[in-house]
Amino acid sequence: MTQQTSYYPELARKIHSPQGALGVLLPGMGAVSTTFIAGTFLARKGLAAPYGSLTQMQRIRLGKRTDPRFPLIKEFVPLSDLKSFVFGGWDIYKDNCYESAKKASVLPGEMLDPIKKEMASISPMSAVFDRRYVKNLDGPNVKRARTKMDFAHLLIRDIESFKKKNGIKRTVMVWCGSTEIYLEKKKVHDSLALFEKGLKENSSEISPSMIYAYAALMTGTPYANGAPNLSCDIPALWELAQKNRVPIAGKDFKTGQTLMKTIVAPGLKARMLGLHGWFSTNILGNRDGEVLDDPGSFKTKEVSKASVLDAILQPDLYPKLYKELYHKIRIEYYPPRGDSKEGWDNIDIFGWCGLPMQIKINFLCRDSILAAPVVLDLVLFMDLAKRAGLSGIQEWLSFYFKSPMCRADLKPEHAPFSQHLKLQNTLRILMGEEVLDHSGLDYYEAKNSVIEELKGHHTY
Ligand SMILES: NC(=O)c1ccc[n+]([C@@H]2O[C@H](COP(=O)([O-])OP(=O)(O)OC[C@H]3O[C@@H](n4cnc5c(N)ncnc54)[C@H](O)[C@@H]3O)[C@@H](O)[C@H]2O)c1
């Protein structure tokens, strides 16, 4: 017999079943948030199925292919039930979730009718907002305070009173707010001490989403960032996450065009097909599109979208195939389309003897329909991570992000099938199951008698 080496018993965890309600806190209650909340209410009533969600619909293979088990992920790991969710959030507009969902018009009105009461009962708390970081928006529902540290304390108070009012012990926060302008890591982000000094001194390098992340981590709330702005992806907040034993994850939900790109590019690379150019453009007309119409916010998005091809193709290792790649990304704000984005990709590839070929992708997607199940899975997995005693960056959740956060000395993994394997293997490890590497040699090399055993065992 070959020796079994793919168990990591020292990494397995005793994870208790979740008790009581789970507070789901969403800074930004626009298209993505309200589509997620509405879909959850509809699923609870059995009026819609949570398509796109691994936690709700996917099965995971456990054990050998000769004796496999395929439980649903939600039966394999102790996740919270959708019925236990209590929603809360912040927005610069006062619209309740029903009104906001109507305005976003992702889900048709008749789908919202049966859940109108629940949706209308959720009103956003006043936001920490500063137009310098999101230039194309302005709204009345904002907090006033003297320093950024004071703003952080107001958010901490919101979280504590939300928990008290609803009798909740566990909360998770997912940033679904607008994309902020492009900021780079600066000295004030280097350590928790410098960051807290910066909060007190109103450093312009600290954006509202960083203040939300700080407040989340100070209250022991796992924090995931669905937008491309830095938010919790700075050393100061990595430090706070470790110190307070809280999981963090980000950045930028992987949906739409980038999802397609990261599905196609690893395939081309695996087959050693070269790339001359990749032009991606799309039209979208929702509020996110309006925000991205500002060059500052667009730059944040562009950086997030652009990095994926470099990371997947590794042009330094394969200069002949990918060094000359011309990668261009455009986003056009076009109001008539609303949330129904249309993306076009023109991909110029080359193969044997350098001869050129083209691929065209025309993806008519719905941004928030792709993002909502990502939010749901992040809520459930971040809560699981916390209960499992994991803290700091949760790289195993990179599957859900365009710019996955990872340790500073590592490069992020962008290929979705590798990310998916990492996610599922992490669940296997946590639950003390064998890690699957799909090498499969042991089926042929383990026993000399294997061919003998299979004689007469045919599948037609
Ligand atoms: N939909 C997708 O497929 C997708 C994919 C990747 C990333 N994202 C990101 O997710 C975020 C949400 O997208 P959306 O389509 O729901 O956008 P949206 O414009 O409909 O909603 C964002 C909401 O955030 C609010 N907001 C902005 N700053 C805030 C602050 N400081 N505090 C509280 N609220 C604030 C806005 O008022 C708005 O209602 C955006 O950053 C977007 O780039 C979306």
Image: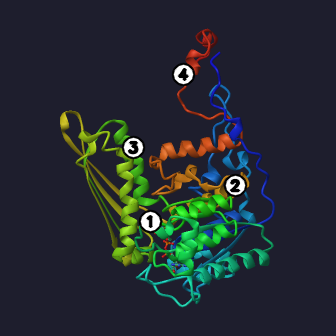
- The Cα atoms of the two marked residues, 2 and 4, are separated by 33 Å
**Marks 3 and 1 in Cβ contact (< 8 Å):** no
Could you tell me if residue 373 is visible in this image?
no
Residue type, numbered disc 4: Leu
What element does badge 3 sit on?
A: helix
State the mark number for residue 185. 1
* Residue type at the position of mark 3: Pro
Q: Which of the marked residues, 3 or 1, is nearer the chain's N terminus?
A: 1
Query: Could you say which quadrant of the image residue 315 lies in?
Result: top left
Mark 2 vs mark 4: in front:
2
Residues at marks 3 and 4, CA–CA distance in whole angstroms: 24 Å
Residue 342 coordinates in the image, percent (x, y): 37, 65
Report the residue at 39% width, 53% height from top: 308
- Label 3 sits on residue: 266
In the image, is 438 to the left or to the right of 386? left
Marks 1, 4: nearer the viewer: 1
Q: In the image, what residue occupies the spot 70% across and 69% down?
A: 219
Q: Are dots 1 and 4 in contact, CB under 8 Å?
A: no
Which x, y percent locates residue 37? 63, 70
Res. 68 in view: yes
> Residue at image x 62%, y 28%?
65
> For mark 2, what is the residue?
384
Amino acid at the residue labelled 1: Lys
Identify the mark nearer the N-term, 1 or 2: 1
- Which sits earlier in the primary sequence, circle 2 or circle 3? 3
Residue 428 placement (x, y as % from top left) = 66, 40
At label 1, counting other C-alpha atoms closer than 10 Å, the crowd grade (few under 14, some 14-19, many 20 or more) is few
Instruction: Identify the element where label 1 is drawn.
Output: loop
The CA distance from mark 3 to mark 1 is 29 Å
